[in-house]
Each structure stands twice: as C-alpha cells, then as structure tokens.
Amino acid sequence: MKKIKAYAAQNAHSPLAPFIVNRRDPRADDVEIEITHCGVCHSDIHQARNEWGASVFPIVPGHEIVGRVSKVGSGVTKFKVGDKVGVGCLVNSCQSCSSCKEGLEQYCENGSVGTYNGIDRDGERTYGGYSTQVVVKESFVLKVPDNLPLAGVAPLLCAGITTYSPLRHWGAGPGKKVAVIGLGGLGHMAVKLAHAMGAEVTILSQSLKKEADGKRLGASAFYATSNPATFAKLEKTFDLIINTVSVELDWNLYLNLLRRDGTLVLLGIPNTAPTVMAPALIFGRRSLAGSLIGGIQETQEMLDFCGQHGITSDIELIKMEEINVAYERMLKGDVRYRFVIDIESFNKAV
Ligand code: NAP
Ligand code: ZN
C-alpha cells in the first residue's frame, strides 16, 4: 500500500482540497501509472457537488488520466515501464456478461466500476486522477499514440470517447449532417471528430462568442440558440444531433431540427428533464437516444484514430490548486475547451 497525494471534495459543499489516498501494490495483472495530466470533466463537478445524488465522500475526481507506466505486475504482457498510457472512466467490470463480451464494458450487466466514486469488485473504493499515481488492471489501460502530446490526449479518455462512440454508432461520415449542442469539453471534441469522419458539422451554442473557434475546430456553420430564428431556419436539417449541454434544455425544440429518421443523442446529464412531446418524435419517425462513454476496445480505436488524424483536445493547463476556480469557469461555459491539471508539477510541489 502506498500513500499518494491527491485533491478531494470532503462533502457536496466544500471546495476541493489536499487529501491522501492509499493505492494498492500492483497485483499480477496491474499496471502502476505515474500520472502526468488529468482532464477536468463536467461530471467531476456533478459528482463533487453530489448533483446526481450518488456521491460517497470524500471524492477524488478525475477520469481523463494520462501518464507513464512506473511498475507492472508479473502477469502483465501489454505494457512495460516507461510506456505512455491512459485511463478513462472505467477501471473494472465483470468481464463475463453479454455487454462485456461485446466490448461494451460501460454497459456491464453486473455494474462496471467507475474510476472514482466507485466500489471495485474487491470492495475497495476507487479514487480518480486528481492524484499523482494510480494502479489499474491491465485490461482497462489504454495505449497512447506516440505522436500525440500527453496533456492534449488526457481529455480524449472521456470527452473524446463519449463523443466518438455515438458518432460511430449513428454513422457520422460523408453525406451526413451533424449538429453539436454546446461547445465545451465534449462539444469541441464532437466537432473535431465528426469533421475528421467526414460529416458536415454545425455548432449550436448559446451565443456567437465562440464562432471563430468553432469554424477553426471544423464546423461549417455556427448558430446561437438564444436567437429563436435559429430554430425556424434549421427545421428538418440534421441526421444526427449530439447534445453535450450539462443543464436542462427543451429537447422538443431540437427534435424539430432533425430530418426524417434522424436521432437526437443525449450526452449531457442534468438531474432534471423536460417533457418530450410525442409529435416531435412521430412526425418524422425521429429518435431520442442516449449514450454512455465507450468500451475499452472502442476507446483504443478512438485513440488510434486521433493518432492517425493528429487530433488532441484544445486545453488550458492548470495547477492542481486552481481546480476550484476552473470549476466556476466551467459552470459559466467559460473554458476553451478543456481544463487539464498539470499533475507533474503537483507531484513535485512540497
Ligand atoms: P462543459 O465543458 O462544461 O460544456 C458544457 C457546455 O454546455 C458549455 O460549454 C456550454 O456551451 C453549454 N451550455 C449550454 N447552456 C448552458 C448553461 N445554461 N450553462 C452552462 N453551459 C451551458 O461540460 P462537459 O465536460 O463537456 O460535459 C457536458 C455534459 O456531459 C455534463 O453533463 C457531463 O456530466 C456529461 N457527460 C456525459 C458523459 C456520457 O457518457 N454521456 C460523459 C462525460 C460527460 P456553449 O457556451 O457553447 O453553449
Ligand atoms: Zn467525463
């Protein structure tokens, strides 16, 4: 057992502050990772503030982890000391149910284990990447393509895979019109990935403030959702709409922007929901769907796709001590486009 420096929320109302976590000694199938960077996902805020009602404190958030292998268990075959690796939202699952067998561990019938705020299969609580080291089962560790910088890769482990998976599942590609609602961490990755897949991308943001950025990221059109004319102009336009907004929206307005057989996929997880009007679905045979992160195999596929296309996240690198200010900025939609914590400097600080 090793004592590791971390940052934790002690309850739903306290800011994050220094904390010590115990990490197990690597077992035969474990990889020990010196964390260099950890991305800051809006889910970290939801959970640090118990907005989903399932938080067990203290919580050490962080599920966009990258770093270097510092030790491997005796049975590890895929990794060696020094390798650049990543860990996303999952650190375990039953690995025997139908979902796990299909590589969809996020939908494990027996409950997958989250990287933080989870209970592992041995009964241990899990603590996330706002910490200097983590020990993870080999089968949940990802290889980071050599050509990509670690800091920009960190957000791919959640924001990247969470948007890649539905884009692939609903066939984003040439000839498809995709809209992305919300240009934050998930949103900007959705734009980059959909563009790289060959789809025509439109951004639906609260205002036009980020329009130049949106076009640079790969969108061909950008609209403000605060302007009611947007909804009239774009009626029946899109094959696929990806909603990344963390607060409640009127989905009916967005369903009307789908063409026949189009799908609105919910990724954002507010703890409230509007009423969905049946006609918004019926007239046009439209679907309202949801999608949860992605399995390990697909996460590796996404990282390799990003390696081939030179895609990383646009980041603002912060110090561990700046995390509470970063949360406040994210709540205002003021992030361009993902905060990433410099864990190496946190590690060195006394
Ligand atoms: P984020 O970086 O904070 O981005 C959210 C974006 O929502 C903002 O940048 C903003 O973009 C937009 N927004 C629209 N109305 C808003 C309002 N009233 N207040 C604040 N923002 C508003 O969050 P994220 O990390 O991308 O996460 C987004 C959501 O996805 C969260 O609910 C998170 O928990 C969830 N999530 C889901 C999964 C999954 O597996 N389904 C995985 C990870 C995260 P504009 O300014 O452009 O409008
Ligand atoms: Zn996340």
Image: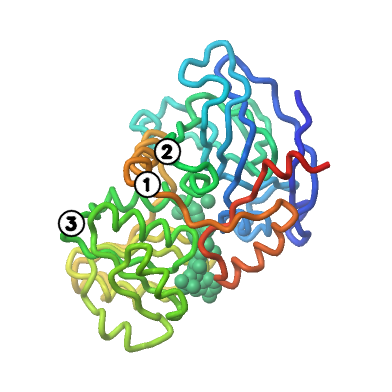
C-alpha span from label 1 to label 3: 19 Å
Q: Is residue 27 left or right of residue 298?
A: right
Front position among marks 2 and 3: 2
Mark nearer the N terminus (2 vs 3): 2
Residue that carries the numbered disc 2 in the rendered image = 147
Which residue is at the front of the view, 117 or 70?
A: 70
Q: In the displayed structure, would residue 113 be above or below residue 328? A: above
Single out the residue that lies furthest toward the top. 74
Residue 248 in view:
no
Q: Which amino acid type is marked by label 3?
A: Pro
- Which secondary structure lies at badge 2? loop
Q: Which amino acid type is marked by label 1?
A: Gly
- Which secondary structure lies at badge 1? loop
Q: Which mark is residue 310?
A: 1
C-alpha span from label 1 to label 2: 8 Å
- What residue is rendered at 44% in x and 68% in y? 182
For the N terminus, the quadrant is top right
C-alpha span from label 2 to label 3: 26 Å
